[in-house]
Amino acid sequence: EGTYLGGGHKIMNLTLSAANPALFRYSKGHISDLTIENPVFEGTFNCGGALATYVMGGTIDNCHVTGNDLVFSGKDCGALIGWVGLVPPSMGTTPSAFDNFKADSIRISNCSNRCHITSTYQQSNANDQNSVAGVVAVINARHYVVTRCFNTGDITSTYRPKFQNDELCFAGVVGRGLLPNYPSEIPYCYNRGDITAHCGYLGGVAGFFNDEAGISTSTR
């Protein structure tokens, strides 16, 4: 928790690994006005992003990733943010934690990715899942707004289908929304990158959402 004001500065050549998968591992506060240029993702790790691994509350505003091409060998990685909302059950989170979530309690605005992304993750079984996106890989929250965000980098997956129901999602802004029946918004977002994969859910703005997530006034 707390506030981080980037002041329009850049962090350059940030090296990320399994031990440090993002500039901020957890965020429940407010982060703004920061650009991460030429980040480097080393090794294989799951749920990473140059800015934050898990955003569990608060706001992210005017933050950007730019520079060199990115390679994700792990799953559920976004150029900017890995996971928004409750962290995976393996991290010890229980459904009752949703009681503390209020409308618009998580807001991501005016953010972007300009890096090309290649996902080399290989699905290990039919129940395995992977989401890759320019801004946010996975959203697991009841109420959130992702607004005025964009992606201009190409996103490519090298994975070849192995199972009948490959649960893979690739998109420019948000890869996957997990929770059904809790309408939230992704307004005024756009994608200008090419999304290429041999299987899965592909989308310009969003890859796959359960039921009623709103994608109003977004393009491509």
Image (cartoon, rainbow, N blue to C red):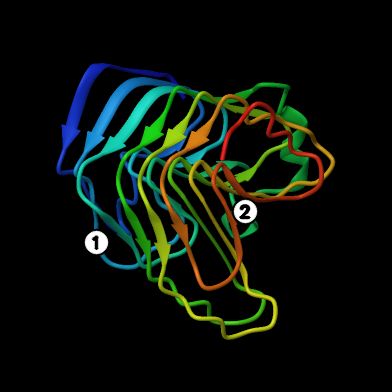
Label for residue 148?
none
Q: Secondary structure at mark 2?
A: loop
Q: How many marks?
A: 2
The residue shown at (60%, 45%) is 206
Q: Looking at this rendering, what residue extends furthest in the right direction?
A: 181
The residues bearing labels 1 and 2 have C-alpha atoms spaced at a distance of 26 Å
Residue 20's place in the image compared with 122, above or below, is above
Q: Secondary structure at mark 1?
A: loop
* Between 145 and 48, the one nearer to me in the picture: 145
Residue 103's place in the image compared with 126, above or below, is above
Tell me where residue 216 appears, x and y as whole percent.
69, 28
The residue shown at (62%, 26%) is 187
Q: To which residue does mark 1 refer?
A: 42
Q: For the C terminus, which image quadrant?
A: top right
Is 167 situated left or right of 44 in this image? right
Tell me where residue 49 appears, x and y as whole percent.
38, 46
Tell me where residue 142 appears, x and y as whole percent.
74, 35
* Between 16 and 194, the one nearer to me in the picture: 194
Hey, which quadrant is residue 9 in on the image?
top left
Tell me where residue 90 appears, x and y as whole percent.
60, 60
Q: Residues within 10 Å of mark 1 (few under 14, many from 20)?
A: some
The residue shown at (41%, 73%) is 158
Hey, which quadrant is residue 215 in on the image?
top right
Give amino acid for label 2: Gly
* Between 113 and 48, the one nearer to me in the picture: 113
Q: Looking at this rendering, what residue extends furthest in the left direction?
A: 13
Give amino acid for label 1: Glu
Residue 136's place in the image compared with 183, above or below, is below
First in sequence: mark 1 vs mark 2: 1
Q: Residues within 10 Å of mark 2 (few under 14, many from 20)?
A: few
Q: To which residue does mark 2 refer?
A: 92
The residue shown at (71%, 28%) is 101
